[in-house]
C-alpha cells in the first residue's frame, strides 16, 4: 500500500514572541497569485521602540534542496538570535518541489519576496534597507546569491527588473557552482528544480547559477564546513576564486569539522561565530550610512 503526504492548505501559525521580540506574519504575494500555505514570511522585530531607519534588516532564505521536506521554521532559532542582537529578520517561505514549486515558480516566489522589502519597510519605518543583508543556507544560499544579482538579468528572465536588490549576501553551505554540483553529489535535486541537466536546459543554468552571474560589486561572505558531505566545499572555493578573478570581494570561511547543517545549529561553536560576523556586518555598515 502506498501513502502520499498531502501538502498543507494553510500556513503554520506565527511563532510565539519571546524575550520582548515581536513576530509578525508577512504576505508578499497578492492573494490571487499566492498559495496561502507557502507564500508567506515571518518578520522578527527586536524589543523596544526604535527610531526610523535604525534597525538593520536581514533576510533569511532556508534550504532543503529546493524541496518541501524543509521549511522556514528551521530558521526560527537563528531569526530569534539575530533579533535579540538588535536586527530585524525577514524569514522567507516559498513554494518548493512538492508544494507547487519547481521551475520557474520557486525563483519567482523568492524574487517577489525580496521585491516586497520596500513595501514592508513603509509599514515598518524603523527598518533600514539601504544596506540590506540576505543570508541563505544550502539551496537557499543559491537563491540568496542569485537574488543579489537579478539586476543583471535580461528582461525575459525570471526575477529580472528587481524592485529591490540586497547590497551584500551570505552563503552558508551553498551550491554556488551548480554545474559542478550536478556531478558532485547534488545532481538529483538540481536537475529536479531546473528541469534537466546543464546540457538539456543550459539557459536555465546560465540564468540562475551564481558562478555564471557574478557581480564584482556584490560583496559575498561564504561559510562552508569541511566535513560537508552534502554540498562539497569546492562549490564555495570555485565561487570565491571566480569572484576574485572578476575583481570582486568574496570572503571564504572554511570550518574544520562542521557538516552541511551543523553550521546553522545552536550547538555548533561555529554558529556563534557566524552570528557574530553577521551582526558586525549589518550594524557596522548601517553606522557608516548614518554617519555619512
Image (cartoon, helix red, strand yellow):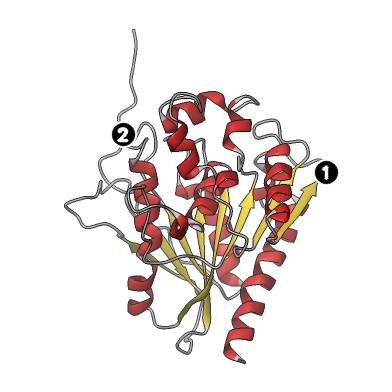
Name the one closer to the observer, 258 or 226. 226
Along the horizontal axis of the image, is 261 left or right of 12? Answer: right
- Label number found at residue 256: 1
Q: Position of residue 10 (x, y in %)?
A: 27, 45
Instruction: Name the residue located 50 percent from the left edge and 51 percent from the top edge.
Output: 146
* Residue at 37% across, 72% down: 118
Query: Is residue 53 rendered to the left or right of residue 113?
Result: right
Q: Give the farthest residue toward the bottom.
A: 291
Could you tell me residue 70's position as x and y percent? 48, 39
Q: Disc 2 vs disc 1: which is toward the camera?
A: 1
* Nearer to me, 268 or 133: 133
Q: Is residue 41 above or below residue 101?
A: below
The CA span between labels 2 and 1 is 38 Å
Crowding around mark 2 (Cα neighbors within 10 Å: few <14, some 14 to 19, many 20+) is few
Can residue 174 be seen in the rendering of this structure? Answer: yes
Q: Position of residue 202 (x, y in %)?
A: 47, 32
Which disc is residue 7 wearing?
2
Which of the labelled discs sits on residue 165, or is there none? Answer: none
Asked if the residues shown at circle 2 and circle 1 are in contact, with their CB atoms under 8 angstroms apart, the answer is: no
Residue 50 x, y percent position in the rendering = 48, 86
Q: Is residue 117 left or right of residue 186?
A: left
Quick one: SS at disc 2?
loop
Secondary structure of the residue carrying tag 1 is: loop
Residue at 63% x, 85% y: name it: 287
Work out which residue is located at the far right of the displayed protein and give it.
256
Amino acid at each position: 500500500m502506498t501513502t502520499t503526504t498531502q501538502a498543507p492548505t494553510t500556513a503554520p501559525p506565527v511563532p510565539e514572541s519571546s524575550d520582548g521580540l515581536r513576530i509578525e506574519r508577512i504576505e508578499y504575494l497578492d492573494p490571487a497569485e499566492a498559495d496561502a500555505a507557502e507564500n508567506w514570511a515571518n518578520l522578527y522585530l527586536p524589543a523596544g521602540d526604535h527610531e526610523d531607519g535604525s534597525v538593520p534588516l536581514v533576510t533569511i532564505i532556508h534550504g532543503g534542496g529546493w524541496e518541501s521536506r524543509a521549511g522556514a521554521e528551521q530558521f526560527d532559532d537563528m531569526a530569534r538570535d539575530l533579533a535579540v542582537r538588535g536586527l530585524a529578520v525577514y524569514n522567507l517561505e516559498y513554494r518548493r518541489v512538492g508544494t507547487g514549486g519547481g521551475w520557474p515558480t520557486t525563483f519567482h516566489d523568492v524574487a517577489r519576496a525580496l521585491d516586497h522589502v520596500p513595501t514592508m519597510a513603509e509599514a515598518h519605518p524603523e527598518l533600514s534597507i539601504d544596506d540590506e543583508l540576505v543570508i541563505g543556507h544550502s539551496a537557499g544560499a543559491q537563491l540568496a546569491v542569485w537574488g543579489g544579482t537579478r539586476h543583471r538579468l535580461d528582461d525575459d528572465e525570471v526575477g529580472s527588473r528587481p524592485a529591490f536588490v540586497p547590497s551584500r549576501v551570505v552563503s552558508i553551505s551553498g551550491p554556488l557552482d551548480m554545474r559542478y554540483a550536478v556531478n558532485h553529489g547534488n545532481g538529483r535535486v538540481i536537475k529536479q528544480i531546473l528541469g534537466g541537466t546543464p546540457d538539456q536546459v543550459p539557459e536555465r543554468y546560465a540564468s540562475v547559477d551564481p558562478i555564471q552571474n557574478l557581480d564584482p560589486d556584490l560583496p559575498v561572505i561564504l561559510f562552508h564546513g569541511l566535513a560537508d558531505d552534502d554540498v562539497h566545499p569546492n562549490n564555495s572555493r570555485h565561487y570565491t576564486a571566480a569572484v576574485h578573478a572578476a575583481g570582486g570581494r568574496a570572503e571564504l570561511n572554511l570550518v574544520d569539522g562542521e557538516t552541511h547543517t551543523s553550521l546553522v545549529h545552536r550547538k555548533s561553536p561555529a554558529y556563534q561565530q557566524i552570528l557574530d560576523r553577521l551582526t558586525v556586518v549589518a550594524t557596522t555598515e548601517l553606522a557608516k550610512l548614518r554617519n555619512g
